[in-house]
Amino acid sequence: MPLTPRAPATGEPLLVVKNLKKYFPIKKGVLIDRTVDHVKAVDDVSFHVNAGETLGLVGESGSGKTTTGYCVLQLLKPTDGTVMFQGRDLTKMRKGDLREVRRELQVVFQDPYASLNPRMTVGDIVSEALLIHDIGDRGSRRRSAEQLLEVVGFNPDFINRYPHEFSGGQRQRIGIARALALNPSLIVCDEPVSALDVSIQAQILNLLKDLQAEFGLAYLFIAHDLAVVRTMSDRIAVMNRGKIVEEGPAEEVYSNPQDPYSQALLAAVPIPDPRRMRERRAERRKHQDVLAESV
Amino acid sequence: MPLLAVNNLHTYFKTREGEVRAVDGVSFAVDRGTMLGIVGESGCGKSVTMLSIMGLIELPGRVVEGTAVFQGRDLLKLKGRELEDLRGHEIGMIFQDPMTSLNPTLTIGTQITETLRRHLGMSKQQARKRAIELLEEVHIPNAASRLDDYPHRYSGGMRQRVMIAIAISCNPKLLIADEPTTALDVTVQAGVLDLLHEVRTDHEMAGIIITHEMGVVAETANDILVMYAGQVVEHASAYDLFDRPEHPYTEALLEALPQVEGEGIRDGRLRSIPGRPPDLIDPPEGCRFAPRCAYAGLDDCAAVQPELREIRPGHWVRSRHPASERSAQPVGVP
């Protein structure tokens, strides 16, 4: 059942997020809590993701990018706004219907050490979604798990092993195989390579690119590393303090950023070219005021 | 004579599975006023190298061999008290995590003045006055009023600025920064790196920066040491290393790095390095990179360890197949 390439994208975007807000209350009081204020983690954010493409959501810690991803997945209940996925508003859905939607909408988490249950075998982790959705029998689920592991470049003979036996990069492969199990159309990737070394990071990024080309997946790719986001994304949205400050085709945002914060962010990225050290330092000095404000 | 000369350093850790050769024959020198960058991936031995030099290796780890001569004295032979006199005084240190390297129960002022009083014998008032100057030097706004705050009132970037203030408080000759910006956001990182450059230039200090990021060494260091599996695999000036990398590992690492600038990035693939770094309990007998190397041929690669050799003036490489010799001497690429 799993893993069939999709038909090419039609006109309608796969995911449309409109005026999304997520406020967390700040509470005070000894016996009776009262809400004194709100942290506006996500404050009126709108964007869309087309079938088969990658939208990169980039920002620094506390910018609200992960909270946005969680609101899309309905792992957090948005305070306001709509999340239309395949034409249906997820924010108004009941649990049972959401479960159906989750076949199409999956997630890869940041920390490959914390996101895999240490008591489950690799095979059980990868095929758990099939069990939950009551797809196939034991034998077919096992074959699916082997097939999924092979797709992500993981030795299927390790199906009975446990996550602790594997390195960070291998665990992230298991996490990706798990996300693929139900043949989703959109995967939210929340900092999928930030815990990995450069050489391993490249393996995982290439894998995500290959899977996208092969199965027509769309990604909402959330990361703080501007170079990683650029490598993966067709379009980019830059977040700062709960808002999207700039959004556009990746090449444009990177070569000619319009928003002062995006400019400062790009000027701050260390470039592996020592000849440009001076020029970069001077460039950064120009943006100091913007950053002082944004902290 | 260099300010610091490390020669043939070996640091091993005893574990139940066997002895881990975390640092296995590392040599380098740091000249006055220059910045050396040590770069490599997790577990390559870059941090252990620094901790060994500073006498901060604890059991089950142990420096088994080597010398580290700083201003005529071998740091590896100094006793506890002598080392204490030196650390924080002539050698300043900045660690990775500004959240844990400051004591949360002491004010920022106390933590800066304790260094000044211990090493320079200043009075309380003198030290306080100097502490304010130091905070101003690292660009903490309203320094005088921030002196009595506790670390939790400071952001991550400001804490790292405080760490820099403490590290330079006794005007050391050498400043060692171990992953000083790894825990920080990219805009904050840029500020801290620029500050490091500024204080080093103002005080004519030499420095060593340890990092896993190629971009960070490119923007800070004059000389670069690339480490892999406990050994130095390449050592060159920053310009020469990025212009003409020689070691297959350095080349692969640079090509594995996603780029922020350029065209056609979205459609391209990154070069990945197959496999993983070797087990340092039982490292490969020959070249330690051979099992992952695209050029390791049918020759001695797997059997005999290559020496670190000077391929051109100032550029050292530990490989039988450095980039500039490859065309002249084709090998059986697997």
Image (cartoon, rainbow, N blue to C red):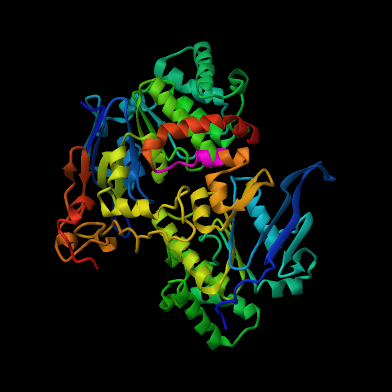
Q: Indicate the position of residue B234 as horizontal and vertical percent values.
A: 26, 46
Q: Indicate the position of residue B281 as horizontal and vertical percent values.
A: 28, 57
User: Is A106 placed above or below A33 here?
Assistant: below
User: Is B293 placed above or below B206 here?
Assistant: below
Question: Is A158 contained in the magenta span?
Answer: no
Q: Quadrant of the C terminus of chain A?
A: top right
Tell me if I can see residue B101 in this picture.
no
Q: Indicate the position of residue A133 as horizontal and vertical percent values.
A: 65, 79
**Residues in magenta, as a range:** A264-272
Tell me if I can see residue A198 in this picture.
yes
Residue at image coords 30%, 45% = B226
> Considering depth in this image, is A45 or A2 the residue closer to the camera?
A45
Left or right placement of residue B2 versus residue A179 in this view: left
Q: How many marks?
A: 0
Residue at image coords 54%, 66% = A116
> Considering depth in this image, is B186 or A77 the residue closer to the camera?
B186
User: Is B144 placed above or below B11 here?
Assistant: above
Q: Quadrant of residue B84?
A: top left
Left or right placement of residue A290 versus residue B70 in this view: right
Q: Quadrant of the N terminus of chain A?
A: bottom right
Residue at image coords 46%, 35% = A280
Residue at image coords 26%, 57% = B289
Q: Indicate the position of residue B173 as horizontal and vertical percent values.
A: 33, 23
